[in-house]
Amino acid sequence: MTTAPDRPDITHYASVEGRWNPAKDDSLTVSFYGTSSMLIKAGKSSLLVDGFFSRPAANKLLDGPIAPEPTVIDACLDRAGIDRLDGVVVVHSHYDHAFDSPLIARKFGVPLIGSASTANIGRGYGVSEDLLRTVADGEALSFGDFEVTFIETLHCPGDVSPGTIDEPLVPPATFEKWHSAECYTLLVRHDTGCVLIQASANFVPGKLDGITADVVYLGIGMLGKQDQTFRELYWQHLVRNTKARSVIPVHWDDFMTPLLDGPLLPQPYLMEDVVPSIDFALEQGKRDGVTVLLPTLWTPLAPLEGPVLDS
């Protein structure tokens, strides 16, 4: 008797991982670490987005309180070659974005940047007040050769833990204590172009009017559970309206599996089937002349230099 798989097979998408043109000395590079965790570097500056390396297993989430694992965090930072940072940004305060971020900010003595709820997570982790940086909608922060603008957006439909965190969150705690709070789209500007990071699959109509981007890191988690109209509007607002040339789907992997064990696995069917979301992105990209490539784990890429296209 054949046992049905518990998650979709995405090995046939290996060809859409693609290859990117090499970074130049002045290139902005992005390294991907699963979910929406990534390192942005340009010149001597580097910014970690959503540092999430502990990735508690499903049984731990169900059994009760969870807490970051410093040894796992250190091993992942070492694997990533991260030995200095200028800041840690949290796009919203769910545990799969904010779980490890305060410890990493504290480790490097750099600002933890995000909402007031993210600041309360930092307080619960013992991050000093001088390192807690809250941002306003539309605020821009400079990091050496690049600038990041924080644009408030919406969490994808079906938020399992909405609301704000109004007092210090001290781990261990159950995962739903990490409420989403404000969500941000990140617009990263560099002399060579712009990168848009949208971790959660939702949009605010008109919010990105007038904004252009060369590359969009597009969150597709739970996108397959939405209807076709929602998906098309999402693509319209995030990709077509911004005139992006390339799309890199993120937040599709099973973040309850160890990152160091790699490769990334898709979410199990119990959570969602990511295949319709990937297929949708590929179909829209083909229609609009937009290159859609899955991210490469650990490897620094220069997305603004463009992908290597087959002739």
Image: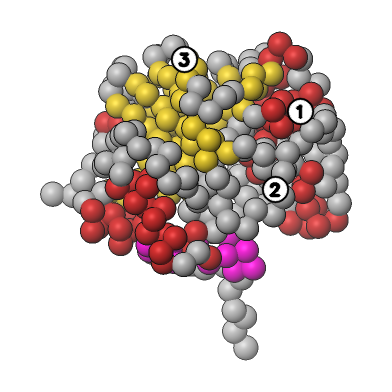
Earlier-in-chain disc, 2 versus 1: 1
* Structural distance between the alpha carbons of marks 3 and 1: 23 Å
Name the residue nearer the viewer: 93 or 99.
93
Residue drawn at 47 percent across, 20 percent down: 140
Residue drawn at 18 percent across, 49 percent down: 310
Q: Nearer the viewer, mark 2 or mark 1?
A: 2
Residues in magenta, as a range: 266-280
Q: Is residue 54 visible?
A: no
Q: Quadrant of the N terminus?
A: bottom right
Residue drawn at 46 percent across, 23 percent down: 148
List x then y, in percent, for residue 307: 27, 40
List x then y, in percent, for residue 176: 77, 48
Question: Label 2, on which residue?
Answer: 162
* Structural distance between the alpha carbons of marks 2 and 3: 30 Å
Disc 3 residue type (three-letter): Ser
* Structural distance between the alpha carbons of marks 2 and 1: 15 Å
Q: Nearer the viewer, mark 2 or mark 3?
A: 2
Residue 142 - label: 3
Q: Is residue 79 left or right of residue 93?
A: left
Mark 2 touching mark 1, by CB under 8 A?
no
Residue 120 - label: 1
Name the residue nearer the viewer: 35 or 116.
116
